Amino acid sequence: MTNYELEKMAKLTAKYLIEELKRDDSLIDSLLPPKFMNIQEASIFTGLPIGTIYQKINQIPHTKCGKRLIFSDRALARWMNRQ
């Protein structure tokens, strides 16, 4: 296979992968591990003050680990896109 053919195949593969990820964003979970954040990091990630996050905690995807709140970057990004 020539370099031109390899480059063309790589571009087509990338285009196909991007289209599939747009169609089903859960596929990214199998490709890249999620990043988990504490409330301070979630505040920076979302641009929301910590107080607002606490006020909207029933709407914002999170997990409790003991008394701590844990946020997934992917879940927060999906939530933000729906808002």
Image (tube, grey):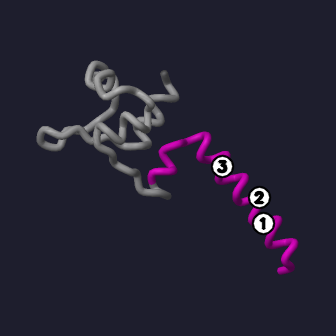
Q: Amino acid at mark 2?
A: Leu
Quick check: is 6 in the magenta stretch? yes
Residue 51 left/right relative to 21: left
> Cβ–Cβ below 8 Å for labels 1 and 2?
yes
Which range is magenta? 1-29
Q: Which residue shows up at 43% across the image and 38% down it?
A: 45
Residue lying at the far left of the rendered structure: 66
Quadrant of the image containing the N terminus: bottom right
Residue 45 is tagged as: none
Q: Which residue shows up at 65% across the image and 53% down it?
A: 17
Q: Which residue is mark 1?
A: 9
Q: Earlier in the sequence, mark 1 or mark 3?
A: 1
Q: Amino acid at mark 1?
A: Met
Q: Which residue is mark 2?
A: 12
Mark pair 2, 3: CA separation: 10 Å
Residue closest to the eye, 22 or 52: 52
Q: Earlier in the sequence, mark 2 or mark 3?
A: 2
* Quadrant of the rendered image containing residue 7: bottom right
Residue 16 left/right relative to 74: right
Q: Amino acid at mark 3?
A: Ile
Label 1 Cα crowd, 10 Å radius (few <14 / some 14-19 / many 20+): few
Quick check: is 34 in the magenta stretch? no
Q: Which residue is mark 3?
A: 18
Residue 78, position as x, y percentages in the image:
47, 34
* Quadrant of the rendered image containing residue 79: top left
Residue closest to the eye, 38 or 13: 38
Mark pair 1, 3: CA separation: 14 Å
| SS class, disc 3 | helix
| SS class, disc 2 | helix
